[in-house]
Image: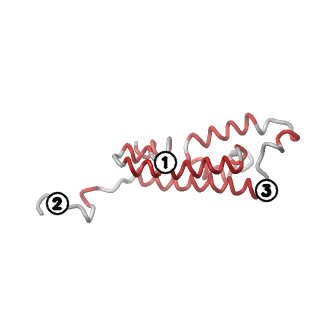
């Protein structure tokens, strides 16, 4: 359940496991990368149809990546070329934006795996036993 929550909203899985501070730091870091990418390149940086290989990594950001792709397809890609050219990130700006968003998604993949396999607190080497 924690891994699913970590995909639905970054950091939520760790909060569900009782690691509130860690969850908030994860949330801030991943959402910072996602929204920085959108600010740099616009909605065109998330495009399932034209940049499918990038979207594979971006999808690990959770449903917000699918919402951004839907908005891109609905409001940018359906426009005539003379209007669309003014609404998309071009060349290196678009690549940088896609990289930010993809890195956020890949970081969230690591977080999802961490939430899926939480450490057993009894096996932690620094944990004091009640006998000591």
Q: Vertically, is 24 above or below 126?
A: above
Q: Residue at x 63, y 55 (%)?
A: 100
Residue 130, picture quadrant: bottom left
Residue receiving disc 3:
91
Which element is circle 1 on?
A: helix
Q: Residue at x 29, y 56 (%)?
A: 120
Query: Does 38 sit left or right of 4 as displayed?
Result: right
Q: Nearer the viewer, mark 2 or mark 1?
A: 1
Q: Residue at x 86, y 37 (%)?
A: 80
Return the disc, 2 or 1, that comes first in the chain's sequence: 1
Residue 1, picture quadrant: top left
Give the Cα distance between marks 2 and 3: 58 Å
Query: Does 118 sit left or right of 90 as displayed?
Result: left
Return the disc, 2 or 3, that comes first in the chain's sequence: 3
Return the x and y of residue 107 as percentages of the image width and height: 53, 56
Give the Cα distance between marks 2 and 1: 32 Å
Quadrant where the image shows the C terminus: bottom left
Residue receiving disc 2:
129
Considering every residue shown, the one lying at the far left of the view is 131
Q: Residue at x 69, y 36 (%)?
A: 71
Q: How many marks?
A: 3
Return the x and y of residue 35 as percentages of the image width and height: 61, 47
Residue 115: which numbered mark, if any? none
Query: Does 39 sit left or right of 62 as displayed?
Result: right
* Category of crowding for the residue at label 1, using alpha-carbon neighbours closer than 10 angstroms: few (below 14), some (14–19), many (at least 20): some
Return the x and y of residue 56 as percentages of the image width and height: 62, 51
Which element is circle 2 on?
A: loop
Q: Vertically, is 94 above or below 49?
A: below
């Amino acid at each position: 359940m924690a891994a699913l929550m970590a995909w639905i909203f970054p950091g939520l899985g760790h909060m569900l496991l009782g690691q509130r501070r860690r969850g908030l730091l994860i949330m801030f870091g991943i959402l910072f990368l996602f929204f920085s990418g959108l600010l740099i390149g616009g909605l065109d940086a998330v495009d399932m149809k034209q940049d499918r290989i990038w979207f594979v990594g971006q999808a690990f950001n959770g449903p917000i990546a699918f919402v951004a792709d839907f908005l891109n397809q609905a409001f940018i890609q359906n426009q005539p070329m003379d209007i669309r050219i003014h609404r998309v990130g071009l060349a290196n700006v678009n690549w940088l934006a896609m990289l930010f968003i993809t890195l956020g998604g890949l970081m969230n993949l690591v977080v999802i795996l961490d939430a899926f396999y939480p450490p057993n607190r009894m096996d932690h080497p620094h944990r004091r036993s009640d006998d000591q």
